[in-house]
Amino acid sequence: MPRILYLLNISNPDKLASDSGWIVADILAPALMDQGADFVMAAPARVRDGRARFERTAVPVNKYRARLDPTMNELVALIDRTTPDVVVANQVEAATAVRAALLEAKSDALLAGYCHYLPFSPRRGQLLHDPALDDRGLGWPVLLTFAAGLAACDRILVHSATAATWVVDAAARAGTDITDRIRIVPPPRDERLVRDPAELSAMTTGTSLTGIYNHRLYQHYGTPRFVTLAQQLTARTQARLRVMDLFGSRSPERVALDDSPERMRDELAALPNVEVRTDRGDRGTYRRMLEECHFGFGPFRPGCPWAMSVIDCQGMGLPVIAPRMDWFAEHIAADLLFTTDAEAVALVERLACDADFYLAQAKGALASTAGLNPAVVAARYLEAVA
């Protein structure tokens, strides 16, 4: 079994429960090691499993440093110390530097890039820059750096078939054919957030439902669209809405870069029948908060290739309603997709009033996560980097 050097940037080391990259690593690492892999975590924070070797790296000053300042000297020294068989670059933009560092260290390790976050969204035959990475026109350079990273990788891992199509297309536009290097390896579900199917039951007809929105509240995640939908739902149905505050109190520096989470949180909290809650990073509290809800929402984020928060809801048997676009159209049952706010309102009313429909969708939601068991995902991961 290989020795895997897992390079991970963590943007919120003081709030690990809100960092999806760390959560994936924390769930995946034990499953990989159970199957014989030697796992070395190079990141600002370690995973909880003590079997994993840990190499601490610095927290980048900002999101551009994470992508454009890969610290070559440190990379070469890290490769020399750990002698990996496989290097996983979770920041694909850094993969070119990792390839050069492998060359300098005289290592023949396989380089895999995991496309954890895509710095673009495809729309009407065009690639749109991620607005969160387009300060002073940096969107296009970041996208080109991402494409260069794809070209440097021996394997390219993506979350979904939707993401695979997008990433292959983005590489082709930059003149690189990566079709034979792409592998679909979805993130694992969190087994702490999986309900026993026997616990699922039909809702009493006409029950007042509580829906949970457990996504980041950045403006570029489509939160203003959800604010509009929340206004419609609270005005036209008996549903109550729970909004997760994943960040809590952020540093003045982060707020200065983007204050949209605070603005969106305050707008939502001001609506009737909407509560803003935090689990304070505790997974047990998070599970109980999900247990108290009846359905979930997908985000309105353009170019969404995956949503761990959606999987959290589905693992708990909560039907998730989502916009009819991107990965949601691939993964979520067609009966739960909507295009307009009116369709979303009608879906919530049907979940409340049609007990058979609700139970069928709850069972389907839970079943849709079965293939995301960590052991299953770890086996796919090891096959992908073999």
Image: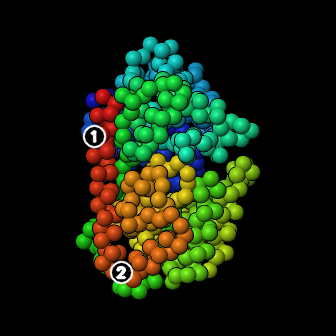
Q: CA distance from mark 2 to mark 1?
A: 39 Å
On the image, the x and y values in percent for residue 335 come to 38, 67
Three-letter amino acid code of the residue under disc 1: Ala
Q: Secondary structure at mark 1?
A: helix
Task: Give the vertical position of 170 relative to 27 (above or below).
Answer: above
Relative to 95, residue 262 above or below? below
Q: Residue at x 41, y 86 (%)?
A: 206
The x and y percentages for residue 373 are: 30, 51
Q: Residue at x 50, y 79 (%)?
A: 239
- Residue occupying the point 68% across, 57% down: 260
| Residue 159 seen in render | yes
Residue 283 percent coordinates (x, y): 44, 61
Display coloring: rainbow
Locate residue 354: give its quadrant. bottom left
According to the image, label 2 marks what residue?
A: 354
In the rendered structure, the answer to whether residue 209 lies left or right of residue 300 reads: left
What's the amino acid at mark 2? Asp
Residue under the point 43% across and 71% down: 295
- Residue 126 location (% of width, % of height): 57, 40
Kind of element beneath mark 2 = loop
Point out which mark residue 63 bears.
none
Q: Is residue 343 above or below residue 64?
A: below
Nearest to the eye among marks 2 and 1: give it: 2
Please tell me which residue lies in front, 287 or 360.
360
Residue 379 image label? 1
Q: Quadrant of residue 217?
A: bottom right
Which corner quadrant holds the N terminus?
A: top left
Closer to the camera in the image, 132 or 125: 125
